[in-house]
Image (cartoon, helix red, strand yellow):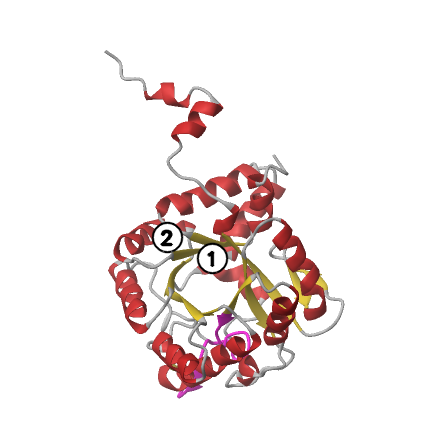
């Protein structure tokens, strides 16, 4: 007798009935880049379809995002000025803080997540304060905590530290609680690899290191057990959600963290993953939409609850049946 699994693949209706993994618009988080100025919507060359927005233009973009059913955005800021210690990261009149306040005033139901890191704000491009030629972990914690607090004051629902300093979740949690922001959550970039897949983002955020690299504080791509250790440590320190970044090259890590972690798990479908698909689509080498949806379903299948992705609007249109 021949066993015939193909019977369950015979028609679209049957395939839909037995599909093991699903993806919803509610699973998507859309990253946005905000900067000072007025009337700005500048294309990002290395990330086709993505833009820098001034704070006055962000409301129109959020309105479109909401209309697609996407529940949350992740904000990154580009300051007008940088300094060695990244002090503009926690100034209350910077682009991120003002954007959060504007969005919350207009759309209080939109979930706002803010990236907490110094790399966009330091003149050397590293994620922390430099001492003796190295990123100093402990002195960086104060700046990160002040940045998170400024975001919470503006109205952010979640702060997301991406710096990979040891102890930063505990430091931020303590700072938020001490100042009365016990309801502000923390989505920790607990498992963030020193990856080449961040290249387009570093152009978009003007955050490439001016010397060396980030291998001294971001994770070695060869390590897997360490990822579980990092996730468990951040859980103990008070994280509300755990993130793995990048996503597609690290699906095994998403699965391992999923098996060890009871918190909601976020995977970041990063800029390099996005730009590769866009480039292949532009060259006619791949069907961009089908490849995009395959990538997202693979991330879900690996165990992610939520996906941060620059494809969020395109995927939402397909999931909503508006762009089949």
Would residue 147 appear left or right of 191 to someone viewing this image? right
Q: Which is closer to the viewer, label 2 or label 1?
A: 2
Mark 2 and 1 residues: CB-CB less than 8 Å, in contact?
no
Q: Give x and y (percent) for residue 160.
A: 45, 69
Give the class, few, some or many, for how many residues have Cα within 10 Å of label 2's Cα (few <14, many ≥20).
Answer: some
Name the residue nearer the viewer: 171 or 226: 171
* Range of magenta residues: 115-133
Q: Main secondary structure of the magenta part?
A: loop
- From the image, tell me which residue sits under label 1: 197
42 or 242, which lies in front?
242
Q: Which residue is mark 2?
A: 250
Helix, strand or loop under label 2: helix
Q: Position of residue 300 (x, y in %)?
A: 41, 46
Q: CA distance from mark 2 to mark 1?
A: 11 Å
Is the residue 285 above or below the residue 178 in the image? above
Q: Position of residue 295 (x, y in %)?
A: 46, 44
Tag shown at residue 105: none
- Name the residue rendered at 44%, 74% in the picture: 212
Label located before the other in sequence (2 or 1): 1
- Residue 226, by quadrant, is bottom left
């Amino acid at each position: 007798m021949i066993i015939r699994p193909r019977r369950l693949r015979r028609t679209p209706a049957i395939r839909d009935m037995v599909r093991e993994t699903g993806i919803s618009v509610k699973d998507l988080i859309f990253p946005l880049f905000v900067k000072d100025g007025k009337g700005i919507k500048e294309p990002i060359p290395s990330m086709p379809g993505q833009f820098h927005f001034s704070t006055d233009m962000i409301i129109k973009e959020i309105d479109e995002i909401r209309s697609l059913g996407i529940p949350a955005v992740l904000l990154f800021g580009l300051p007008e000025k940088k300094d060695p210690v990244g002090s503009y990261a926690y100034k209350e009149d910077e682009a991120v803080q003002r954007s959060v306040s504007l969005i919350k005033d207009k759309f209080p139901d939109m979930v706002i997540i803010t990236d907490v890191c110094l790399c966009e704000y330091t003149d050397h491009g590293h994620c922390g304060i430099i001492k003796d030629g190295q990123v100093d972990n402990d002195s960086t914690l104060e700046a990160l905590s002040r940045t998170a607090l400024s975001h919470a004051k503006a109205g952010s629902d979640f702060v997301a530290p991406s710096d990979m300093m040891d102890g930063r979740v505990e430091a931020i949690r303590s700072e938020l609680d001490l100042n009365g922001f016990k309801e502000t959550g923390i989505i920790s970039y607990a498992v963030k690899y020193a990856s080449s897949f961040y290249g387009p983002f570093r152009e978009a955020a003007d955050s490439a290191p001016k010397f060396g690299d980030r291998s001294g504080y971001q994770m070695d791509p060869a390590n897997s057990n360490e990822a579980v250790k990092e996730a468990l440590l951040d859980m103990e320190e008070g994280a509300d959600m755990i993130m793995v970044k990048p996503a597609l090259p690290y699906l095994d890590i998403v699965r391992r963290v999923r098996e060890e972690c009871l918190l909601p798990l976020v995977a970041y479908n990063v800029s390099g993953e996005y730009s590769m698909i866009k480039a292949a689509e532009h060259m006619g080498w791949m069907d961009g939409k089908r490849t995009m949806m395959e990538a997202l379903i693979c991330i879900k299948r690996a165990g992610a609850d939520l996906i941060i992705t620059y494809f969020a609007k395109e995927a939402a249109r397909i999931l909503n049946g508006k762009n089949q």
